[in-house]
Amino acid sequence: MAPADSNFQHSHTSSNTVCVINASGHLGSALVERLLLRGYTVHAAVQHDDEQMQFNGLSCENKKLKIFRSDPFDYHSITDALKGCSGLFYAFEPPQDQPIYDEFMVEVEVRAAHNVLEACAQTETIDRVVFTSSVTAVVWRDDRKSTASELDETHWSDVNFCRKYKLWHGLSKTLAEKTAWALAMDRGVNMVSVNAALMMGGPDVSITHPYLKGAAEMYEDGVLLTVDMNFLVDAHICVFENISSYGRYLCFNHVVNRHEDALKLAQVLTTPSAAPMLPQSYEQDMRIIQQRISNKKLNQLMVDFECGSQVH
């Protein structure tokens, strides 16, 4: 019987070149750095000229890094960045001139996902796409109180529920991911998605982050989750390299299900003077909300994953 870690051989042996779109985001830039450490040649695609600056020093030092100017609404710029790549890591970043999640953003994110997957379908060397989605594409459902089972990768947020309560982040992530899956299945693109919790440690993580709309309800439902950036990066690389990975993977490593945890999270997300005051009753302090979501699928996949550098 083959050892478990024999799954960690990428299926395309002729190319260790991968593309990261959008490489200028916090997750994207962390992925670029980790992929370079693991021996990949990386095509880092950024949307704006000023975003190339963050990689200038790195690209001089590392011949395996190539910077591309790529707009998710310009199909040809995506195909240029993908040329010769065996894999793509795709994480949507809101445009600089439209950073707020609203109804307009839904259309923007869906269109970007469609363009990127279409470009992958047209690029013969692409073996696998890792599509970054969100926990918000899983948890927002009308029946979330009544369903007895834990939420997992088989569940989807209800788009009508999201529209009704103006949960634009959830709506955007749900429709963009569904668009990507439909295209991937139709065009034979090998795709896996990482449905990430709120990523901690990023410069844009604050109490106003669109992920957190409905945070009180998520907390009460046992689905208020966060993920450390390093764990999230590991998860992306693991699902890419492990040939047995498939479908969707919920990715989180902390469940906020105690009053004390909620208070700590609120303090991290706000300036001390603006930290919200939560009720201090004894019963509330002691209560532990039952976790109602599972990341078992990802945890099983990552058992044998080695997160350091790897010779390719």
Image (tube, rainbow, N blue to C red):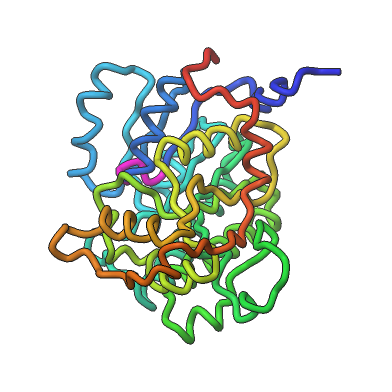
Q: Position of residue 185 (x, y in %)?
A: 70, 55
Q: Position of residue 232 (x, y in %)?
A: 47, 41
In the image, 13: left or right of 118? right
Most distant residue in the front direction: 282
In the image, 65: left or right of 304? left
Toward the viewer: 292 or 72? 292
The residue lying at 72 percent from left, 20 percent from top is 6
Toward the viewer: 179 or 284? 284
Q: Is residue 22 magenta?
A: yes
Q: Is residue 172 above or below residue 196?
A: below
Q: Position of residue 297 (x, y in %)?
A: 68, 45
The residue lying at 35 percent from left, 75 percent from top is 102
Q: Quadrant of residue 12?
A: top right
Toward the viewer: 213 or 80? 213
Toward the viewer: 64 or 269? 269
The residue lying at 38 percent from left, 57 percent from top is 260
Q: Position of residue 256 (x, y in %)?
A: 45, 57
Q: Quadrant of the C terminus?
A: top right
Q: Quadrant of residue 179?
A: bottom right
Looking at the rendering, the stretch of residues picked out in magenta corresponds to 21-25
The residue lying at 44 percent from left, 27 percent from top is 35
Q: Is residue 285 above or below residue 9?
A: below
Most distant residue in the top direction: 311
The reply to whether residue 43 is in sight is yes
In the image, 71: left or right of 57? right
Q: Is residue 10 above or below residue 257?
A: above
Q: Quadrant of the N terminus?
A: top right
The reply to whether residue 107 is in sight is no
Mostly what secondary structure, the magenta segment? loop
Q: Is residue 44 magenta?
A: no
